[in-house]
Image (cartoon, helix red, strand yellow):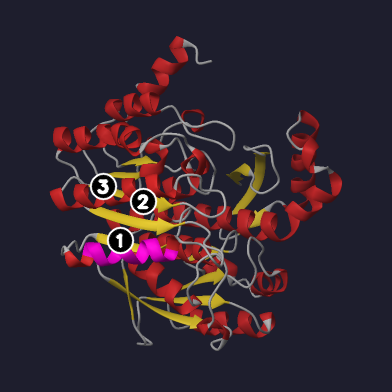
Amino acid sequence: MFRPALLLSLLLAAQAGAQTLLPLDSRPATRVLPALIAGLAGGAPHVPPALLLGNAAQEANPALLAAWLKAQPADGPLIVALDALAYGGLVQSRKSPLTAEGALARLEPLREWHARTGQPVYAFITLPREPDATNRARNLAVARAMLEWAASGVLAQLDITWDDALPGSPAPAEGAALAKEAADRGLTGVRVYPGADEVLSMLVARALAPQPKTVRVEYSDPAAAQKVIRYEGIPLTQSAANHAAGSGFTVTEDADADLTLYVFNGGDPRKAALRVSALLRRGPVAVADVEKVNLGNSRLWADLTTLRQHANLRSLAAWGTPGNNLGAALAHAKLSLSGADPLRQDALLAREYANDVIYSTELRAALRKAVPEKELDTPQGQAELLRLAQNYFPLRIGNEYALADAGLPWGRSFEWDFELKPR
């Protein structure tokens, strides 16, 4: 239960001069990371406090989110995950009992915001995964209604994405039908592709770094990159192209591209580390490690760290699905190429390393070995996380960082949140 004074302070916590983000839910990957990317050039984006957003067990309150949005300054774009308002979060978008009419009513504050401010709205909505979805027809109807909002100018950009499409999921076919409808209507501001957690970061890149940039994509295993990947139902090469375009890049084969995205998708990790080192001598490089889902390759990152090349990357990602990692790496890199503050860039790279390399490849497994999953959401479980995590710090990127705090925001081992302090 919110205390009135606390709620008032949350709703009125508006600052001037920055864009507003309305994340998918309260997870660090969907709330903290996009905000840090948005703030690379300076300033502080307006982002709802975590307790106003949905989590695994509780949907966000749409009235509170609408009130928070109304309290924000109207001097920059709004970048929004539509599922947060329509259903209360990604998890709830799969099982919410709302009708399409009810979900659309919850989205009306966005139409009102655009009419009042005249600022552009960059938005995305997901087609839910199977077998969790309980009302696909409802979700599809709401996504189709967003095409109308795009056509009428309410949405400057609309991404329709599908979440975790395992074999047999109807989402790719639904997406193809919506993409055809958008193309037939000449809606050039609509993109349709697989994605979810990474998409707000990509919209941030498009909105805040609109300058044209090129990217060349290189794979550690080019032959394997042609195969269909898990959770997306398309080849890895197509996913990379989707996420590049979604982050505002044009894909090229030119060796003089503004960025090289090195995708580790298998093979010899030592050879891959040496290749990344060679590429860095030519120009900016980002690394997306997609060999496994939710798990980085420890040998690759150990070798890159030994070579001290992890500190020279524009971005890195190894925390999620292939699409999560491609989108996060490209979005961060796009902002880094557009005038990022050096201290903020180094701090974000340190956070990515701590999350994607330290936690995802090593610390999570150590935590699961030390504490049963059902006991993690206790003071003892959280204390054990902090104790184990201290073994991996201080961390040096350009600056050196100490671990100031750490916790499990959703009470599970999949993700952690943490605070790094530069020394």
Q: Nearer the viewer, residue 402 or 214?
A: 214
The amino acid at mark 2 is Leu
Taking the spot 26% from the left edge, 36% from the top edge, the residue there is 110
Mark 2, residue position: 140
The amino acid at mark 1 is Leu
Cα–Cα gap, marks 2 and 3 = 9 Å
Main SS, magenta residues: helix
Mark 1 Cα shell of 10 Å, populated few (<14), some (14-19), many (≥20):
many
Mark 1, residue position: 178
Q: Which of disc 3 and disc 2 is earlier in sequence?
A: 2
Residue 207 seen in render: yes
Taking the spot 14% from the left edge, 48% from the top edge, the residue there is 152
Taking the spot 54% from the left edge, 69% from the top edge, the residue there is 288
- Secondary element at image label 1: helix
Taking the spot 64% from the left edge, 80% from the top edge, the residue there is 266
Magenta region: 172-182
Q: Quadrant of residue 253?
A: bottom left
The answer to whether mark 1 and mark 2 are in CB contact below 8 A is: yes
Q: Nearer the viewer, residue 125 or 306?
A: 125
The amino acid at mark 3 is Ala
Mark linked to residue 334: none
